[in-house]
Image: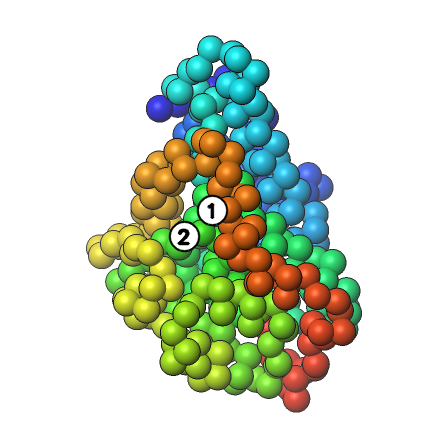
C-alpha cells in the first residue's frame, strides 16, 4: 500500500518556525506524529498548543476528507485510503530510544493556572474522543504527563526494554506534586484494578515493559533484542504500524469517536472541570518536574 497523491504536504512539521513535531503519512490511512521537543519531548504549552493540537486537526481533516469522498458517491478506491479507514500513531523522537515523553516541563507550567484547563486537558479530551484509533508507540521512558498522553490513546505499543531499559511511571509521589484531577480521571478510565491504581499513583512504581504488558497498561511489546540505536525506535514504530493496519477499518462507519465519547463520559466530564479543581500545588522541591 502506498500513499495517495492527493494528500497534504507530508512530512509536515509544526510549528513551522521552530518545529516540535513532524507528521508523516507512511501508508494510506495511517498517520504518524513524531514528537521531538528536545530529547525527551516535554509537553510544554507551546508543544501542546502550537504543535500537538494543530497536528490532530491536520490528521482529522485529512481523514474526514478521505471518508467524505466515499460518502459523496465518488468511486470507492480502498487502495488510496478513501474508504474511511484510519489510525494515528504518536511516537517519541525517532533517532533515539531513551524517551517517549518525560511529561510536563513542570517549572514552566506550575504557576500557570490555565495550563491544565486551556492546554493539557483539551489535548487529553481530544485524544480520548478522536474519531480514528490512536496508538502510542512508546519507544523509551514514559513518565508522568507523558504516561497520561499514552493512556489517552486507544492502544499502546512499547519497546521490550532489551536494548535499553524503559519505564512507565507516575512519579509525582516521589517529589511531592499532587495529581491534577484530570490525571485521576484518565487513570480510573484506563485501569480498573484498585491495587494496580495504587501501585501507579501512590507508590510511583516504575513499570518495566513486561510488567506493563502483564498489567494491561500496554497492548504489545516490540522485540529489540540485538538491535542498534539507529533501528530501535523504527522497530517499535513498525510494530505500531502493524497494529494500526489491524484496527484501521474500525472507524469506517464514523462512530468510533462517538462511541468513545459515551464510553468515557465520566472521565471527560471530570477532565473538563474548572481550573480550581485542577490547580497544581508547587512541590517542596522547586527542582522537581512533573
Instruction: Residue at 49%, 41% (x, y): give it.
Output: 256
- Looking at marks 1 and 2 on the same chain, the residue that comes earlier in the sequence is marked by 1
Vertical placement of 91 versus 182: above or below?
A: above
Place residue 113 in its image quadrant: bottom right
Image coordinates for residue 164, horizontal then vertical, percent:
33, 64
Place residue 276 in its image quadrant: bottom right
Disc 1 is placed on an element classified as strand
Front one among 105 and 77:
77
Disc 2 is placed on an element classified as strand
Query: How crowded is the residue under tag 1: few (<14 C-alpha within 10 Å), some, or many (20+)?
Result: many
Instruction: Residue at 28%, 67% (x, y): give it.
Output: 214
Whether residue 103 appears in this view of the structure is no
Mark 1 and 2 residues: CB-CB less than 8 Å, in contact?
Answer: yes
Instruction: Residue at 51%, 38% (x, y): give it.
Output: 255
Q: Which residue is mark 1?
A: 134
Image coordinates for residue 139, horizontal then vertical, percent:
40, 56
Q: CA distance from mark 1 to mark 2?
A: 6 Å
Q: Which mark is residue 155?
A: 2
Query: How crowded is the residue under tag 2: few (<14 C-alpha within 10 Å), some, or many (20+)?
Result: many
Residue that extends furthest to the left in the rendered view of this protein: 226
Whether residue 133 appears in this view of the structure is yes
Front one among 290 and 77:
77
Image coordinates for residue 207, horizontal then vertical, percent:
36, 72
Front one among 261 and 191:
261
Image coordinates for residue 195, horizontal then vertical, percent:
38, 80
Amino acid at each position: 500500500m502506498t500513499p495517495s497523491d492527493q494528500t497534504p504536504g507530508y512530512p509536515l512539521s509544526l510549528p513551522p518556525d521552530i518545529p516540535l513535531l513532524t507528521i508523516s503519512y507512511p501508508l494510506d490511512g495511517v498517520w504518524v506524529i513524531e514528537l521531538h521537543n528536545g530529547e525527551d519531548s516535554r509537553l510544554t504549552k507551546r508543544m501542546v498548543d502550537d504543535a500537538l493540537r494543530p497536528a490532530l486537526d491536520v490528521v482529522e481533516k485529512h481523514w474526514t476528507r478521505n471518508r467524505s469522498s466515499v460518502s459523496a458517491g465518488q468511486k470507492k478506491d480502498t487502495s488510496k485510503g478513501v474508504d474511511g479507514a484510519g489510525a494515528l500513531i504518536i511516537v517519541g523522537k525517532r533517532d533515539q530510544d531513551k524517551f517517549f515523553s518525560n511529561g510536563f516541563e513542570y517549572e514552566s507550567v506550575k504557576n500557570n493556572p490555565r495550563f491544565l484547563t486551556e492546554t493539557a486537558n483539551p489535548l487529553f479530551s481530544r485524544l480520548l474522543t478522536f474519531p480514528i484509533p490512536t496508538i502510542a508507540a512508546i519507544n523509551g521512558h514514559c513518565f508522568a504527563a507523558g504516561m497520561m498522553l499514552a493512556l489517552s490513546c486507544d492502544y499502546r505499543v512499547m519497546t521490550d526494554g532489551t536494548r535499553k531499559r524503559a519505564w512507565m511511571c507516575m512519579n509525582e509521589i516521589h517529589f511531592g506534586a499532587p495529581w491534577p484531577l484530570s490525571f485521576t480521571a484518565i487513570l480510573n478510565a484506563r485501569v480498573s484494578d484498585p491495587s494496580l491504581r495504587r501501585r501507579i499513583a501512590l507508590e510511583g512504581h516504575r513499570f518495566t515493559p513486561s510488567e506493563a504488558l502483564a498489567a494491561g497498561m500496554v497492548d504489545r511489546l516490540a522485540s529489540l533484542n540485538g538491535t542498534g540505536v539507529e533501528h530501535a525506535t523504527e522497530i517499535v514504530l513498525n510494530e505500531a504500524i502493524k497494529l494500526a493496519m489491524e484496527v484501521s477499518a474500525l472507524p469506517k462507519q464514523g462512530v468510533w469517536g462517538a462511541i468513545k465519547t459515551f464510553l468515557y463520559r465520566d472521565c471527560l466530564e471530570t477532565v473538563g472541570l474548572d481550573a480550581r479543581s485542577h490547580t497544581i500545588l508547587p512541590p517542596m522541591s522547586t527542582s522537581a518536574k512533573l
